[in-house]
Amino acid sequence: MSSLEVYLSGEIHTNWREEIEEGCKAAGLDVTFTAPVTIHENSDDCGVAILGEEESGFWKDHKGAKVNALRTRTLIERADIVVVRFGDKYKQWNAAFDAGYAAALNTPYIVMHDPALTHPLKEVDGAALAVAETPGQIVQILDYVLTGSLPGRSAAEAAA
Protein backbone atom coordinates (compact mmCIF):
# COMPACT_ATOMS: atom_id res chain seq x y z
CA MET A 1 0.00 0.00 0.00
CA SER A 2 1.48 3.32 -0.98
CA SER A 3 -1.06 5.94 0.09
CA LEU A 4 -4.16 6.47 2.19
CA GLU A 5 -7.11 8.84 2.27
CA VAL A 6 -8.13 9.44 5.89
CA TYR A 7 -11.24 11.28 7.05
CA LEU A 8 -10.81 13.00 10.43
CA SER A 9 -14.21 13.20 12.14
CA GLY A 10 -15.43 14.57 15.44
CA GLU A 11 -14.38 17.11 18.01
CA ILE A 12 -13.48 20.52 16.54
CA HIS A 13 -12.26 22.45 19.58
CA THR A 14 -8.65 21.22 19.80
CA ASN A 15 -5.78 20.82 17.33
CA TRP A 16 -5.75 17.00 17.20
CA ARG A 17 -6.18 17.02 13.41
CA GLU A 18 -3.11 19.19 12.92
CA GLU A 19 -1.09 16.94 15.26
CA ILE A 20 -1.95 13.88 13.16
CA GLU A 21 -1.28 15.68 9.87
CA GLU A 22 2.06 17.01 11.10
CA GLY A 23 3.04 13.62 12.53
CA CYS A 24 2.32 11.87 9.25
CA LYS A 25 4.22 14.52 7.31
CA ALA A 26 7.22 14.20 9.66
CA ALA A 27 7.11 10.41 9.21
CA GLY A 28 7.05 10.82 5.42
CA LEU A 29 3.71 9.06 5.07
CA ASP A 30 1.63 9.54 1.92
CA VAL A 31 -1.69 10.37 3.56
CA THR A 32 -4.36 12.72 2.26
CA PHE A 33 -6.65 14.07 4.96
CA THR A 34 -10.21 15.30 4.71
CA ALA A 35 -12.49 16.57 7.45
CA PRO A 36 -15.79 18.25 8.17
CA VAL A 37 -15.95 22.02 8.15
CA THR A 38 -14.35 22.91 11.47
CA ILE A 39 -15.41 26.55 11.57
CA HIS A 40 -18.46 26.15 13.77
CA GLU A 41 -20.35 29.16 12.40
CA ASN A 42 -19.87 28.04 8.79
CA SER A 43 -21.08 24.56 9.63
CA ASP A 44 -24.15 25.95 11.42
CA ASP A 45 -24.99 28.52 8.72
CA CYS A 46 -24.22 26.62 5.50
CA GLY A 47 -27.83 25.64 4.82
CA VAL A 48 -29.33 29.11 5.13
CA ALA A 49 -26.35 30.82 3.51
CA ILE A 50 -26.76 28.66 0.41
CA LEU A 51 -30.48 27.79 0.35
CA GLY A 52 -32.07 30.83 2.00
CA GLU A 53 -33.01 32.06 5.45
CA GLU A 54 -35.44 30.31 7.79
CA GLU A 55 -37.58 31.82 10.52
CA SER A 56 -37.39 28.75 12.71
CA GLY A 57 -34.17 27.53 14.32
CA PHE A 58 -35.34 23.98 13.70
CA TRP A 59 -35.47 24.48 9.93
CA LYS A 60 -32.20 26.42 9.91
CA ASP A 61 -30.51 23.48 11.67
CA HIS A 62 -32.31 21.01 9.39
CA LYS A 63 -30.97 22.70 6.24
CA GLY A 64 -27.47 22.92 7.71
CA ALA A 65 -27.48 19.28 8.76
CA LYS A 66 -28.50 18.17 5.27
CA VAL A 67 -25.86 20.26 3.49
CA ASN A 68 -23.19 19.12 5.96
CA ALA A 69 -24.28 15.50 5.42
CA LEU A 70 -23.63 15.87 1.68
CA ARG A 71 -20.02 16.78 2.46
CA THR A 72 -19.51 14.30 5.29
CA ARG A 73 -21.01 11.28 3.55
CA THR A 74 -19.14 11.99 0.32
CA LEU A 75 -15.79 12.25 2.10
CA ILE A 76 -16.39 9.18 4.30
CA GLU A 77 -17.34 7.15 1.21
CA ARG A 78 -14.00 8.13 -0.40
CA ALA A 79 -11.94 7.40 2.71
CA ASP A 80 -9.75 4.34 3.22
CA ILE A 81 -9.87 4.88 6.99
CA VAL A 82 -12.00 7.11 9.21
CA VAL A 83 -10.63 8.48 12.48
CA VAL A 84 -13.35 9.53 14.92
CA ARG A 85 -12.36 11.78 17.84
CA PHE A 86 -14.60 12.17 20.85
CA GLY A 87 -13.63 15.09 23.07
CA ASP A 88 -14.31 15.53 26.75
CA LYS A 89 -16.06 18.90 26.80
CA TYR A 90 -18.80 18.60 24.17
CA LYS A 91 -21.03 15.75 23.09
CA GLN A 92 -20.15 14.92 19.50
CA TRP A 93 -23.33 13.28 18.23
CA ASN A 94 -22.15 13.80 14.67
CA ALA A 95 -19.00 11.78 15.44
CA ALA A 96 -21.14 8.85 16.59
CA PHE A 97 -23.11 9.09 13.35
CA ASP A 98 -19.88 9.18 11.32
CA ALA A 99 -18.59 6.05 13.09
CA GLY A 100 -21.86 4.27 12.36
CA TYR A 101 -21.87 5.41 8.75
CA ALA A 102 -18.30 4.20 8.25
CA ALA A 103 -19.23 0.87 9.82
CA ALA A 104 -22.29 0.56 7.56
CA LEU A 105 -20.03 1.12 4.54
CA ASN A 106 -17.54 -1.42 5.91
CA THR A 107 -14.92 1.35 6.03
CA PRO A 108 -12.46 0.70 8.84
CA TYR A 109 -12.48 3.27 11.57
CA ILE A 110 -10.32 4.19 14.53
CA VAL A 111 -11.76 5.87 17.60
CA MET A 112 -9.74 8.32 19.68
CA HIS A 113 -10.82 9.44 23.14
CA ASP A 114 -9.80 9.79 26.75
CA PRO A 115 -10.04 6.56 28.80
CA ALA A 116 -12.75 8.21 30.93
CA LEU A 117 -15.11 7.86 27.92
CA THR A 118 -14.57 4.12 27.49
CA HIS A 119 -17.83 3.09 29.14
CA PRO A 120 -20.18 5.51 27.35
CA LEU A 121 -18.50 4.72 24.01
CA LYS A 122 -18.29 0.94 24.45
CA GLU A 123 -20.49 0.17 21.44
CA VAL A 124 -18.65 2.63 19.20
CA ASP A 125 -15.31 1.26 20.44
CA GLY A 126 -16.54 -2.30 19.95
CA ALA A 127 -16.98 -1.82 16.20
CA ALA A 128 -13.72 0.12 15.75
CA LEU A 129 -10.60 -1.65 14.54
CA ALA A 130 -8.51 0.34 17.03
CA VAL A 131 -9.15 2.62 19.99
CA ALA A 132 -6.44 5.21 20.59
CA GLU A 133 -5.93 7.92 23.17
CA THR A 134 -3.48 10.26 21.41
CA PRO A 135 -2.80 11.70 17.95
CA GLY A 136 0.66 10.08 18.13
CA GLN A 137 -0.94 6.65 18.37
CA ILE A 138 -3.02 7.43 15.28
CA VAL A 139 0.15 8.39 13.39
CA GLN A 140 1.80 5.13 14.48
CA ILE A 141 -1.23 3.12 13.34
CA LEU A 142 -1.23 4.84 9.93
CA ASP A 143 2.53 4.27 9.64
CA TYR A 144 2.02 0.58 10.41
CA VAL A 145 -0.82 0.31 7.87
CA LEU A 146 1.30 1.91 5.13
CA THR A 147 4.77 0.50 5.91
CA GLY A 148 4.47 -2.33 8.42
CA SER A 149 6.93 -0.43 10.64
CA LEU A 150 6.66 -0.35 14.41
CA PRO A 151 7.88 2.48 16.62
CA GLY A 152 11.56 2.06 17.42
CA ARG A 153 12.11 -0.65 14.82
CA SER A 154 13.74 -0.35 11.44
CA ALA A 155 11.96 -1.06 8.17
CA ALA A 156 14.21 -4.11 7.72
CA GLU A 157 12.99 -5.52 11.04
CA ALA A 158 9.43 -4.94 9.94
CA ALA A 159 10.02 -6.83 6.69
CA ALA A 160 11.68 -9.80 8.42
Image (spheres, rainbow, N blue to C red):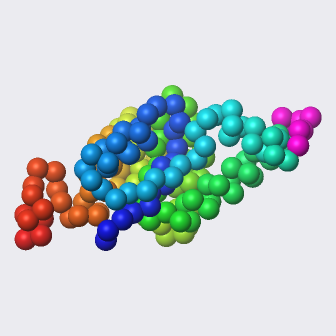
User: Which segment did they paint magenta?
Assistant: 52-58
* Residue 11 versus residue 137 in the image, above or below: above
Where residue 53 sits, quadrant-wise, is top right
Is residue 137 at least partly visible in the picture? no
Please state the horizontal and vertical placement of residue 141, each as a whole percent of the image: 29, 55
5 or 98: which is nearer to us?
A: 5
- At x 83%, y 41%, the residue is 48
Please state the horizontal and vertical placement of residue 110, each as a whole percent of the image: 40, 54
- At x 44%, y 65%, the residue is 80
- At x 51%, y 38%, the residue is 11
Furthest-right residue in this view: 55
**Left or right of residue 90: residue 148:** left
Is residue 86 at least partly visible in the picture? yes
Q: Is residue 73 magenta?
A: no
* Residue 79 versus residue 72 in the image, above or below: below
Instruction: Locate the N terminus and report the quarter of the image it occupies.
Output: bottom left
Please state the horizontal and vertical placement of residue 23, each as a whole percent of the image: 30, 44
- At x 17%, y 56%, the residue is 150
Looking at the image, how many numbered discs can be counted on the residues?
Answer: 0
Which SS does the magenta portion mostly show?
A: loop
* Residue 43 versus residue 31 in the image, above or below: above
Please state the horizontal and vertical placement of residue 68, each as a whole percent of the image: 69, 49
Instruction: Locate the C terminus and report the quarter of the image it occupies.
Output: bottom left
Where residue 52 sits, quadrant-wise, is top right
* Residue 135 versus residue 83 in the image, above or below: above
